[in-house]
Amino acid sequence: MAARRYPRLCRLLAGLGGAASLVLLVSLYTAGSEVQVGWQMLSELTFFPLWRREKPLYKLDVNWPLIPFTGQTFCVAVDDVNGLVYVGQRGDENVPKVVVYTEDGYFLQAWNASIEMPHGIFVLNTPNATSVWITDVGTGKYGHTIKQYTPSGELLQVIGTAGRAGSGTNPLQFDQPAEIFVEESGDIYIVDGDGGLNNRLVKLTPDFKTLWLHGENGSGTAQFNIPHSVTVDAVGRVWVADRANWRIQAFQKTTGEWLGCWNSCFTQDGPSSVRLTPDQRYMIVTHINIDRVSILAAPPVGSIEDCVVMGAIQLASEVKPHLVDVSKKTGAIYVAEIGAQQVQKYVPLY
């Protein structure tokens, strides 16, 4: 009877645990004639999600890195095959744009080849080679492009028209491309729109031909307002952090069909990044304006349903977590923090 009559109270008691539930019930019972008022007040409460009271899912690795960074850290990518972490940073001419660490935290090398302002970074491992892809949002002669490098920083190729912002697809043009995701097949997904002309998601072939594109600015279905991060899951769905619309949108990777969106988890700030854990159990999202990393339940196969927050990492004020990556081997989360000028590593506890 109680569960049907007072469902909210029963959910609250289940979340509090035995001792706390007993204290709450005794307090209500001893209130005498005010019991009914107490029940009514409880039914009107706004309850905090249960993750606030559960065991943390991740723990900070306080020993990573062993040598600090020298610039503003905007992006991070993990090379799982070789156990390396690539970080894109900005600063004056003495600050290298890319620094490379081991997953244990040791500094290995730095390079600075033809990059103005790195924004997003991605490492692709194939049976034949490893390459590093960087989105450059600079406005000078190297900007508005996406570049592919060897692990040592040798420039291999450039996508886009260097130094020229635009929306064209033949030839390709970008304006402040935010992030890139490359599949082992060579198919490329780009979110182009860190505040520039474009608000679009583009899928390219390995030879840079456009397969499909969603490119309309707005808040409707398949429209974007600062598409900021992109990833692809194991069942062929493309997930985009639609930052200024405070939502994540999902698309079918082969056809580009819109599958749905999540927005109920984003009531305080929009998502700045999106990545999945190796077991596809959780989705990792950052919120730059509230200094938080959210851990969402992985989207189910089929209907994506509603998003559910399973946990969170609350960072210090003004840390400003920007983009993240997740090690496919260890499950560790690496968070690039603009305000703190550092990358922090969090290891899974589950």
Image (spheres, grey):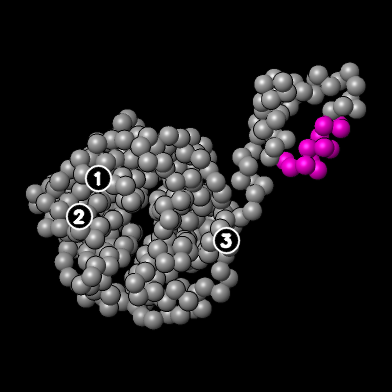
Instruction: Tell me the amino acid under the disc marked 2.
Output: Asp
Query: Which residue shows up at 21% across the image and 76% down it?
Result: 154
**How far from the left and from the top, in percent, is residue 74?**
40, 61
Residue 275: x and y, percent? 40, 53
Measured as percent of width and height from the top left, residue 94 is found at 36, 77
- Earlier-in-chain disc, 1 versus 2: 2
Q: Label 3: few (<14), some or many (≥20) within 10 Å?
A: few
- Horizontal side of 144 relative to 13 (left or right) equals left
- What is the distance, in whole Å, between disc 2 and disc 3 at their CAs? 33 Å
Q: Is residue 121 left or right of residue 209?
A: right
Which is more toward the observer, 81 or 99?
81
Which range of residues does the magenta coloring cover?
A: 16-27
Instruction: Tell me the tag on residue 253.
Output: 1
| Res 46 → quadrant | top right
Residue 21 on the magenta span: yes
Residue 83 vs 321, above or below: the answer is: below
**Three-letter amino acid code at disc 1?**
Lys
Tell me whether the residue at label 3 lies in contact with that at label 1, contact meaning CB atoms closer than 8 angstroms: no
Residue 5 figure quarter: top right
Let me know if residue 136 appears in the view. Answer: no
**Mark 1 to mark 2 CA distance (whole Å):** 10 Å
Task: Tell me the quadrant of the picture where the N terminus can be found.
Answer: top right
Mark 1 and 2 residues: CB-CB less than 8 Å, in contact? yes
Q: Which residue is mark 3?
A: 349
- Is any atom of residue 203 visible in this view? yes
* The stretch drawn in magenta includes residue 34: no
Question: Disc 2 on helix, strand or loop?
Answer: loop
Mark 2 = which residue? 187
The residues bearing labels 3 and 1 have C-alpha atoms spaced at a distance of: 32 Å
